[in-house]
Image: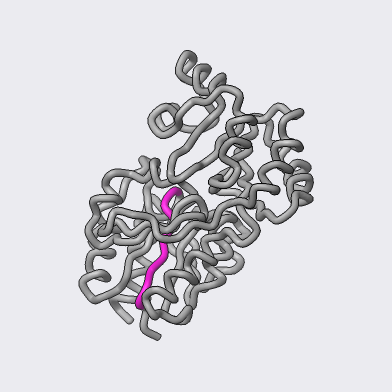
Amino acid sequence: MTIKLIALDLDGTTLNKEGKLSEGNRRALQEAADRGVNIVIATGRPFCALPQEILEFDPVRYVLTSNGAMITDLHEGKAFYENCIAPHAVEAAVEMLEPLDYILETFIEGQAYIEGWYYRQVDETRESFRGVDYILNTRKPVDDFYQFMLDHKDKLENINVNFTDLSEKPAMKVKLETLPDVTITSSFDHNLEIGGATTSKAEALRQMGNLLGIDRSEMMAAGDSPNDMAMMKAAGVAVAVGNAKPEVKAIADFIAPDHDQDGVAAAVEKYVINS
C-alpha cells in the first residue's frame, strides 16, 4: 500500500495540548511531503480560526474547514468547494433553537460568529467552557443572532450548539436529528454541530481524491472525535490517536500515541516513512 494523501484533524490530533504543531509531528509531515505525499488538514474549525503556523507550514496546500463545508487552496488563496446547509434547513433549525437556551455559533464564508451576549460575558469574566482567548480572537459577536442566521441562510457552513450542562446533550442530539436535510456531529464534549445534508470531512476528502487523482486506498486519515469518523472510514488507513473517544478507536486500523506524544508522527512513520 502506498499512501499518497494524509488527512489530519487538528485539535486533539495533530496539535498538542497547547494547540501547537510539535517538532516531532512537523518533521514527520515534512518528510512525508518531501516524498510526494499530500498533507491535507481536515478540521471542524472555520477558516478564520486556523492557526498561523498551519497556514505557514509549506507542506499544507489544502484545508478542509467547517467539517468539510469548505475546501481552500492556500497556494491559490481561495476556496474552490462549498457544501453549506440548505436554506430551508437553516429556517427549521432557527425555529427549533430560538425558544431554547443554548450558546450558538455559526460559520459563514470562513468566518465564525457567536451570540453577542455570550462574547461580552466571556470578555468580562474571562470564563468559558472552552479557551477564552480562542473565543475572543476567532469569533465575531452578533446580536439578534437568529435573524442574522436567517439573513445569511444561503451561506451557513455550520451551526454550533454549545452546552454548559452536558446532561442535556444526548436528548438535544436526538431532537436535532429530526431536522430536515442536515448532518449532526460533534468535535468536542461541549457541542453539537449542524451541517448540510452531505456535509462531512469524508465527502470533502472524496472531493480531494477526485481533484488529485488519488484513490481512497491511497489515503490515511487521523482523528480523535466523532466528526472524524466518516473521514476515517472513507480512507484506506484509519488512525486514532491515543486520546481519541472509544467509538473513534473502535473503527481505527492503528491506534497511535496521544496527541501530546507525537501520535501523528508515529502513524506517518509506520505507514509512509518505514513502509
Closer to the camera, 90 or 189?
Answer: 90
Q: Residue furthest top?
A: 124
Instruction: Give the residue drawn at x 53%, y 17%.
Output: 121
Q: What's the colour scheme?
A: one colour
Say above or below: 34 vs 42. Answer: below
- Residue 9 in magenta? yes
The answer to which quarter of the image holds residue 41 is bottom left
Q: Position of residue 157 (x, y in %)?
A: 54, 48
| Quarter of the figure with the N terminus | bottom left
Residue 116's place in the image compared with 35, above or below, is above
Q: Which residues are magenta?
A: 4-11
Q: Is residue 134 left or right of residue 75?
A: right
Residue 46 visible (yes or no): yes
Rendered view: 216 above or below 55: below
Compared across the picture, whether 244 is left or right of 6 comes to right
Quadrant housing the C terminus: bottom left
Q: Residue at x 54, y 57 (%)?
A: 83
Residue shown at 52% from the left, 61% from the top: 201
Count of labels shown?
0
Please state which of residues 241 and 19 is positioned toward the viewer in this rendering. Answer: 19
Task: Give the image location of residue 197, x and y in percent.
Answer: 65, 58
Viewer can see residue 241: no
Camera-side residue of 271 and 209: 209
* Residue 135 % position (x, y): 45, 30
Query: What residue is shown at x 54% (from left), y 72% (from top)?
Result: 234
Residue 185 belongs to the span the image colors magenta: no
Give residue 91's position: percent from left, percent from top.
70, 41
